[in-house]
């Protein structure tokens, strides 16, 4: 939230409910967090000293903010907004792997998003149609339909070969790995056929293989060596399907062709 006032202390005086003695000689823009104002108001609400309240902000001894304190701050912020003294700048709440939340968490998010002071919600998931945790119902991405209806879903496309090559090139620079162009092209091909994460993990392994043979630049032989040493998901799945009878506690029954293709893909 951005507040427009005469001076820095004037806003704190309003927040604390104290008279402001600063002259209105000019206007400055100060960013304030609602949490900061709630804490200052909380310590004043319980008749503690202002110094003690400010120290609590830096020591982390904030405790729980009571509902009446939040309501007073929300009312004051709404007044400032109506008077043109404040502008609400929403924060950003990022939730990764949102499919791990259960139905109660989704209900809380639905209610919280209805508040005009709620932050911008950004979520990420890699799930398709899956069960919503806490229920027996399935939904796209494991998110209830009513919450999905509130979201703007960003379309994503698989990386192209040129994009994978650029990403691997940047990764080599970040890890200080000197790699030949032939090795980069081979690593790019591996990334296209397997996955980008697998190709990125091979960079460090190939650098160690290069260091083992006392070389200075990662060559094709290093990429081939680590590619044969470390399996990707597809090759590992095929290996398990071929030799599953030789593993302990393995399923020795026949595997359907559709299930086998799904595991490999």
Image (spheres, grey):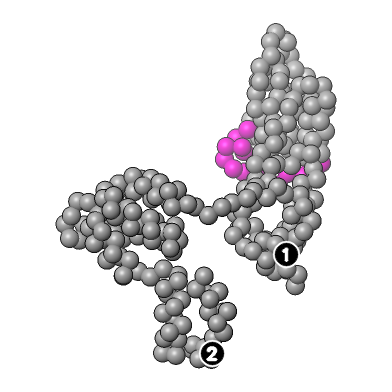
In the image, taking residue 226 as reference, residue 157 lies left or right, namely right
The label number, if any, that marks residue 180 in the structure image: none
Residue positioned 57% across, 79% down in the render: 259
Measuring from the top left, give residue 25's x and y in whole percent: 70, 8
Q: Could you say whether the residue bearing mark 1 is in a helix, strand or loop? A: strand
In the image, taking residue 162 as reference, residue 14 lies left or right, namely right
Measuring from the top left, give residue 40's x and y in whole percent: 70, 33
Q: Which residue is mark 1?
A: 139
Asked if residue 175 lies in the magenta stretch, the reply is no
Q: Quadrant of the N terminus?
A: top right
Residue at mark 1 to residue at mark 2: CA–CA distance = 30 Å
First-in-chain label (1 vs 2):
1
Q: Which residues are magenta?
A: 54-69
Residue 105: name its quadrant.
Answer: bottom right
Q: Which residue is mark 2?
A: 254
Measuring from the top left, give residue 228's x and y in whole percent: 31, 70
Residue positioned 31% across, 70% down in the render: 229
Neighbour tally class for label 2: few under 14, some 14-19, many 20 plus, Cα within 10 Å? few
């Amino acid at each position: 939230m951005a507040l427009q006032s005469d001076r820095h202390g004037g806003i704190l005086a309003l927040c604390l409910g104290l008279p402001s003695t600063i002259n209105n000689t000019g206007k400055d823009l100060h960013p304030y967090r609602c949490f900061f104002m709630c804490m200052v108001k909380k310590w004043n609400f319980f008749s503690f000293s202002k110094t003690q309240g400010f120290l609590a902000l830096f020591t982390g001894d904030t405790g729980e903010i009571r509902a009446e304190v939040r309501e007073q701050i929300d009312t004051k912020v709404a007044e400032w907004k109506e008077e043109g003294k404040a502008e609400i700048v929403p924060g950003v709440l990022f939730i990764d792997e949102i499919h791990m939340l259960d139905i109660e968490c989704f209900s809380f998010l639905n209610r919280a998003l209805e508040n005009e002071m709620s932050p911008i919600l950004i979520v990420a998931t890699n799930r398709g149609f899956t069960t919503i945790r806490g229920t027996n119902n399935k939904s796209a991405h494991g998110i209830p339909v009513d919450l999905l209806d509130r979201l703007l879903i960003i379309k994503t496309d698989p990386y192209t070969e040129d994009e994978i090559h650029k990403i691997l090139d940047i990764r080599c620079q970040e890890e200080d790995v000197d790699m030949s162009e032939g090795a980069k092209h081979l690593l790019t091909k591996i990334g296209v056929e397997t996955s980008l994460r697998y190709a990125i993990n091979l960079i460090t392994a190939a650098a160690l293989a290069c260091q083992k043979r006392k070389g200075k630049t990662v060559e094709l032989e290093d990429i081939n060596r680590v590619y044969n040493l470390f399996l990707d998901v597809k090759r590992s799945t095929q290996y398990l399907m071929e030799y599953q009878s030789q593993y302990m506690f393995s399923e020795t029954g026949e595997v359907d062709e559709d299930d086998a293709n799904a595991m490999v893909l």
